[in-house]
Image (cartoon, rainbow, N blue to C red):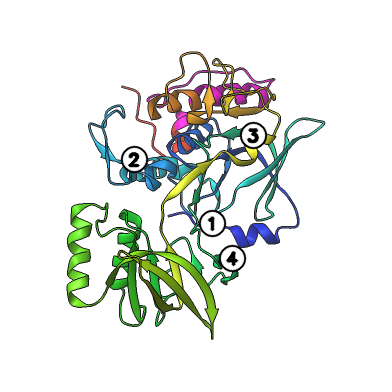
Amino acid sequence: MPGADAAAGAAAAVPTTCDALVIGAGPVGLFQVFQLGLQGIAAEVVDALPEPGGQCNELYPDKPIYDIPAVPVCTGRELVERLLLQIRPFAPRWHLGQQVTQLQPRANGGFDVATSTGQAFIARTVFIAAGVGAFQPRTLPAEGIDTLAPAQLLYRLPPAGTLAGRRVLVVGGEDAAVQSALALADAPDMEAPAAITLLHRRATLTAEPALLARLQACIDSGRVVFQVGQVLSVQQAAGAVAVQVADAAGQTLDLAVDALLVQLGISPKLGPISQWGLAMERRQLVVDAARFETSLPGLFAVGDVITYPGKKKLILCGFHEATLATFAAVALLRPDEPQLLQYTTTSPRLHQRLGVATPPRG
């Protein structure tokens, strides 16, 4: 799976120059990379999440999807895996775990782009495939939460072994929280936390039955403690975190932990896109439905982030939009070249780009 280059981006002194920058690594953004690759255009890809996949991975990784052409059924996660396999020949460069914060047109064409980690780009064309926005974790509204160090307050499950020997409080009651508690409980002894407590405001968890069955087994064996309640406040206490919780009866109890892993879900935020001076309707970008170009020449947008007459928020429609946006971008990037429509079944040039053999003519 591709990895983020946040640290490298922050240290970069020279902007990355590219023909195409894709903002968003959901299914439509990934297919945008594929279409660009077919045209011989390498893509840089930025996404706020630490892994590609967008909504498919974050909201319905294990839910079935039935309306992808020639694929009777696949899960959100499987769709992402297949798209990543499809774009592998084009070797996109990933810039994950960071959000595009600035976009400024250049006087001679193209755009200056900057991200939240300090990564900078000079992009001849930009493709916004941001879906419903950048997904941000829902924060824990508790007194003193801002006083915790980054190692004490986590919103994503860290790499294996990071929480070894520590007392961990997992906060949440849906799939992500249960999966995190199970991942910690199933870790090898050398990587396992000293204690795992799962805290939820209600006694009933809203997770998949299979996950709940595994969790119950961990509770029965003592590997996980389940506590009903809500976090009221947190404070530093001799290198640990003192957490005050209101339980189901309204009584307060104190928990001593080393780290809070907050898994309250995610929410999409359109973020800086709304401040770039682009034409918008109801917080969606207005595009030309023939080119999928925004009100700024060279800045294209596809997927759920856009609106036009007849727009439907379907993955299939996003694939169509990415295809037409690519052809429009090719005309902009190569104005002196004839734009030929080639087919992957017969074109030696496309076969070469895909890394497949051209079948002999029969």
Circle 3 crowding by C-alpha within 10 Å: few under 14, some 14–19, many from 20: few
Q: Secondary structure at mark 3?
A: helix
Residue with the mark numbered 3:
274
Q: Earlier in the sequence, mark 2 or mark 1?
A: 1
Circle 1 crowding by C-alpha within 10 Å: few under 14, some 14–19, many from 20: many
Looking at the rendering, the stretch of residues picked out in magenta corresponds to: 323-350
**Which amino acid type corresponds to the residue marked 2 in the rendered image?**
Leu
Instruction: Locate the N terminus and report the quarter of the image it occupies.
Output: bottom left
Task: Give the Cα separation between the discs numbered 4 and 3.
Answer: 27 Å
In front of the other: label 4 or label 1?
4
Q: Residue 355 occupies which quadrant of the picture?
A: top left
Question: Where does the image place residue 142, in percent across and percent down from the top left?
Answer: 50, 63
Residue 4 bears which disc, if any?
A: 1
Q: Residue 76 occupies which quadrant of the picture?
A: top left
Residue 309 vs 234, above or below: the answer is above
**Which amino acid type corresponds to the residue marked 4 in the rendered image?**
Asp
Asked if the stretch drawn in magenta spans residue 339, the answer is: yes
In front of the other: label 4 or label 3?
4
Instruction: Locate the C terminus and report the quarter of the image it occupies.
Output: top left
Give the side of residue 293 with respect to residue 173, left or right.
right
Residue 220 vs 20, above or below: the answer is below
Residue with the mark numbered 4:
146
